[in-house]
Amino acid sequence: MSFGKVLIANRGEIALRIARTCRELGIATVAVYSTADRDARFVAQADEAVHIGPAPARRSYLYPPAIIEAALRTGADAVHPGYGFLSEDADFARICVDHGLVFIGPRPEVMECVGDKARVRALLAAAGLPVLAGSDGPVTDPSDAEEVAERIGYPVIVKAAAGGGGRGIESARDRGELREVFRRTTAFARQVFGNGEVYLERLVPEPRHVEVQLLADAHGTVLHLGERDCSLQRRNQKLVEEAPSPLLSEEVRRRLGAYAVAGARHVGYTGAGTMEFLLHPGGDVTFMEINARIQVEHPVTELLTGVDLVREQIRVAAGEPLGITQDRITPTGAAIECRVNAEDPAAGFRPTPGRLTAYCPPGGPGVRVDSGFGQGDVIPPDYDSLLAKVIVWAPTREQAIARADRALAEFVVEGPGVATTIPLLRRLLAQPDFVRARHSTGFVEAVMAR
């Protein structure tokens, strides 16, 4: 099977990224857009475009009936959800299948399984993956949460079972904090994810966040493409990602790859995705979750391996076997991705939408910029504030850091009221503890508090 036309159920840079690979594969594309994105670049680059609703995402990009209608009306064979929005919504995937459309991602039942963080944690623990001490499943009562916390020891993390993207996670240092944290997290989970279930885990102090990139087809092949270190993050939202992880020994790296492949096989995973792990200060690793989609930071792995992850994702969804084998995946050099957001770090990372009066992304050797904007475009206030991803490759980590700083220094972004995270990103890259790879997931907050 091959696709003649793919509808891209997303916006911005990821919609543009998917459209580019589709064009190289000879596949026609359909963009869907809200009123706020009528003049966006991803709309202009698609072969067809369909207006699906007003600016609020719940009435456009998060509204399945409009997306399905657009796919059927334009004769699309498949739907690519990108990341965010409906990308990990098992119900949406099932609706696509019910209407004769291929959902470019895992099967709905697999998405349902891995989307329940508490359930998949228990499932992979039974398969032999190391997990943090925690509840055996969802915890529905504050008293039960206190019992679990007393058993595993404080501090603990309360996590939304249906959460994702670093949201729905709070920590509690003692019994006095736990009830309020439990109440806030369940309320947030119910409002944002439509599922108020939460679970508990023991909090790891000063961990590193490491994820393994996976590709799997329907013919029994499961591959890993190495790991990415995502420890530079603010409130569980990633700012800088790099590969390879600078602190992993070859033995731990091999172990992580084996865990990721075994876990993916155990749940019947197909497509592109990541297996997320915590690296403990003492060197232990524990499983966190599976992200059943293409990642924002997937270009890091693409620069290191030369593999077009979106291409393989589309081919797998069309029923084709993976075009690569594990022995041909040989990551070389070092790659870093910096997320340039239209936000003001000095004002609590307040989004700064507005018109771009000047926009000149960097270039030169080893620099890739994924963006959905250009000069004269308007950054709408309705969506994620990601403006661009600056991704660099170099033979060594030291050279990659220097190249990332040079690229960020070249990046010109101007507009009335528009601020970006570029100054903060450059500050983080210059920190001695980052250069020496001594940072952890709490590093950004510590730097900003100085």
Image (spheres, rainbow, N blue to C red):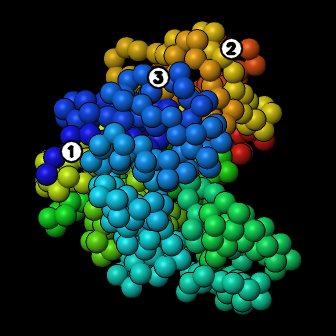
Q: How far apart are marks 1 and 3 (CA)?
A: 23 Å
Q: In this view, does 363 lie above or below 150?
A: above
Q: Which residue corresponds to mark 2? A: 415
Q: Residue 286 at x, y = what percent?
A: 47, 70
Foreground of the two, 231 or 55: 55
Q: Nearer the viewer, mark 1 or mark 3?
A: 1
Q: Which of marks 2 and 1 is in front?
A: 1
Residue 301's tag is: none
Q: Residue 397 at x, y = what percent?
A: 40, 34
Q: What residue type is labelled 3?
A: Arg
Residue 41's tag is: 3
Outermost residue toward the right in this view: 176
Residue ID at (24%, 54%): 317
Q: What residue type is labelled 2?
A: Gly
Q: Residues within 10 Å of mark 1 (few under 14, many from 20)?
A: some
Residue ID at (54%, 45%): 61
Could you tell me if the residues under marks 1 and 3 are in contact, i.e. CB atoms within 8 Å?
Answer: no
Q: What residue type is labelled 1?
A: Phe
Foreground of the two, 61 or 149: 61
Residue 3's tag is: 1
